[in-house]
Image (cartoon, rainbow, N blue to C red):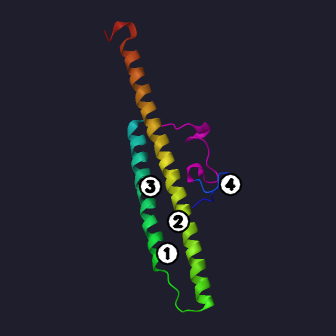
Amino acid sequence: MPERQPSGHGDDTSSYVPYGASGGGGAGGQYVFANLEEIDGIITDLEAIKNDIRDDERYFRQAIRLATRPAEDMMSNGQVEAYHASLRKGWQHNKAVAAYAENQLAKLRAARQTYVDTDSGAADRLRNIDGVGE
């Protein structure tokens, strides 16, 4: 998984952006699609990925709950505490990636709607050229 860029916003996952990512999608921050089927396929794939990421949250909670020290000594306590800390960091990263996926889905849905609106408007204009659509 990509590293989280420092955003200056603490642990706010709404501003998560992986290194190398930019803008709202493709080149210049714009998404470019050939047709609605392409957009719908990408949205479907990303929804499945987002659901998998959300499902992983359960595994983090379960691992934290099940991790117990094997003995009542200082080393055992320290190792379990370190393991819990590592799992909590992984869980926070998981939440950030889930928020990022949701953000990308929102952008794709907006791009899809723009595509539909633009395509419909262009079709209406073409139908009305020289009074053909009247």
The residue lying toward the viewer, choosing from 14 and 71, is 71
Q: Residue at x 56, y 53 (%)?
A: 13
Q: Check disc 4 and give the amino acid type.
A: Pro
Q: Is residue 126 above or below residue 131?
A: below
First in sequence: mark 2 vs mark 1: 1
Q: Are marks 4 and 1 in contact (CB under 8 Å)?
A: no
Q: Which residue is mark 2?
A: 91
Rounded to the nearest angstrom, the CA distance separating label 4 from label 1 is 26 Å
First in sequence: mark 3 vs mark 2: 3
Which quadrant of the rendered structure holds the C terminus? top left
The residue lying toward the viewer, choosing from 70 and 54, is 70
Can you tell which of label 4 and label 3 is closer to the viewer? 4
Q: Check disc 3 and give the amino acid type.
A: Lys
Q: Which residue is mark 1?
A: 64
Left or right: residue 31 versus residue 39 is right
Q: Is residue 33 magenta?
A: yes
Q: Which residue is mark 4?
A: 6
Q: Which mark is residue 50?
A: 3
The residue lying toward the viewer, choosing from 64 and 26, is 64
Q: Residue furthest left?
A: 134
Q: Check disc 2 and give the amino acid type.
A: Trp
Element type where label 3 sits in the image: helix
First in sequence: mark 3 vs mark 1: 3
Q: Which mark is residue 101?
A: none
